Amino acid sequence: MSNTLLSPTAITREALRLLVNNLVFARSINRQYDNQFANSGATMSGKIGPSLRIRMPNRYLVSTGAALQLQDTTEQYQTFTVSTRKQVALYFTAEDLTLTIDEFAKRYLETATAQLANQIDYDALQCAVSVYNNVGTYAAGVPAGGSKAFLNAGALLDCFGVPRDGKRVAVVGPDTQAALVEALKGLFQSSAKISEQYESGEMGTGLGFKFKMDQNVGNFTVGTRVASADYTVDGTQTEGASVILITGTTGKTIKAGDRFTVADTYSVNPMNRQKTGKLAWFVATAAATEVTGTHYSVPIAPAMIASTSNPYQTIDLLPANGKAVVFAGTAAGNYPLDIAFHQDAFSLVTADLEVPNGVDFAKREVVDGISLRIVRDYDINNDSFPCRIDVLYGVKCIRPELACILIGNVA
């Protein structure tokens, strides 16, 4: 009886199944397969290229009275770049294709796709640096291991109008998960839930979030900027600006990802534009430039929009000259970056790669929002069958107001 060879479709779909199952953070965010990139659109000339624009939800002002008060619609967009190419190269023989798909997956695909998934997941988690809202005491090396940290994170998300629709997720590192399970194992849980936590060592669902552990949750080392009291707002700031001017100690660094508040500048709820009672957080989106002497120009998010007539208002008052700028964390401190978010805060987009002709086999499949391509050819020089597994993708924090960083223990 002749052997039946595994088909390219079976191999590609099994690789995709393994890849998708190995993603943690990336599985918890908005994953889009964009048909603008389909049919080799990401690689062929004359197509849309490596970028696309994602339309953000529109906001409007509510008017009072019977008189019609028309207002313009100002579309908001995010530019999404799909240019990260990752691949795993391996080889297998024609005889290997006579294995069952389970044997073939165990021998070849499991390790390859696990490495690929880990890289995608790691890249996705780097988006946490773009999130400005955060809670915590910035205790170096101390995980956010109690209920208060996540209750505070949930309250902050509520203040920003984040839906409670079952799509809130908390992705935490191993140390945070261990601390959480220990601290909360007997609180407000049925015996079945406590048993599940004990047996799996995982938090599960609680405190308003679906908890997931991800080893790719990293630490962030803040800049060398010194005591927060040494920094103040420098001059009059511009409405709608994404750069703030501050003054402080010279010769220090303010890194992308450094977060700070400004005295007397509060955040507003994006739906009703009422002051939340919480100081507005800003995040440096790039390393600050030391303009002259002690003066720094810091690119930030969100933009400073204080006008009550602007539906995209972010703060109640523009930062005033001389107001204290308070940075989070001590100079050069290193802190874990656990994150709580709604799945629409981040997006992962994959694109089709061209399927070449004239090779031993080539196949592309899309499963659960991920497009993956496998190509195998014959190398006559070495009498071998090299194979490659490729993914082309982009990942971005498109709605940072739907996320919150948890830094260290919350007293």
Image (cartoon, helix red, strand yellow):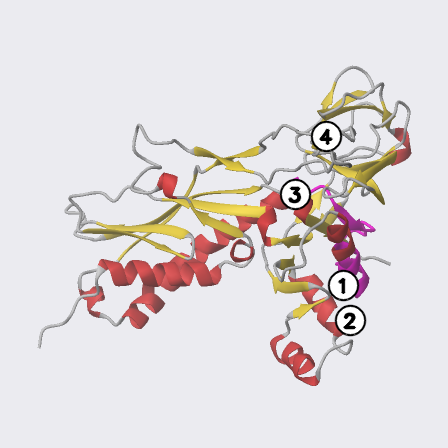
Going by the numbered disc 4, the residue's amino acid type is Asn
Report how far apart the C-alphas of labels 3 and 4 lie in the structure: 19 Å
Q: Which mark is residue 183?
A: 2
Which numbered disc flags the more N-terminal residue, 3 or 4? 4
Q: In the rendered view, does 5 fall on the left or right side of 115?
A: left
C-beta proximity under 8 Å, tags 1 and 2:
yes
| Mark 4 Cα shell of 10 Å, populated few (<14), some (14-19), many (≥20) | some
Bounds of the magenta span?
129-153
Going by the numbered disc 1, the residue's amino acid type is Gly
To which residue does mark 1 refer?
A: 145
- Rendered location of residue 162, percent (x, y): 69, 51
Report how far apart the C-alphas of labels 2 and 3 lie in the structure: 29 Å
Report how far apart the C-alphas of labels 3 and 1 lie in the structure: 23 Å
To which residue does mark 3 refer?
A: 400
Task: Check the image and report above or below for 254 versus 135.
Answer: above
Q: Residue at x 18, y 61 (%)?
A: 94
> Which element is circle 4 on?
loop
Closer mark to the observer between disc 2 and disc 3: 3
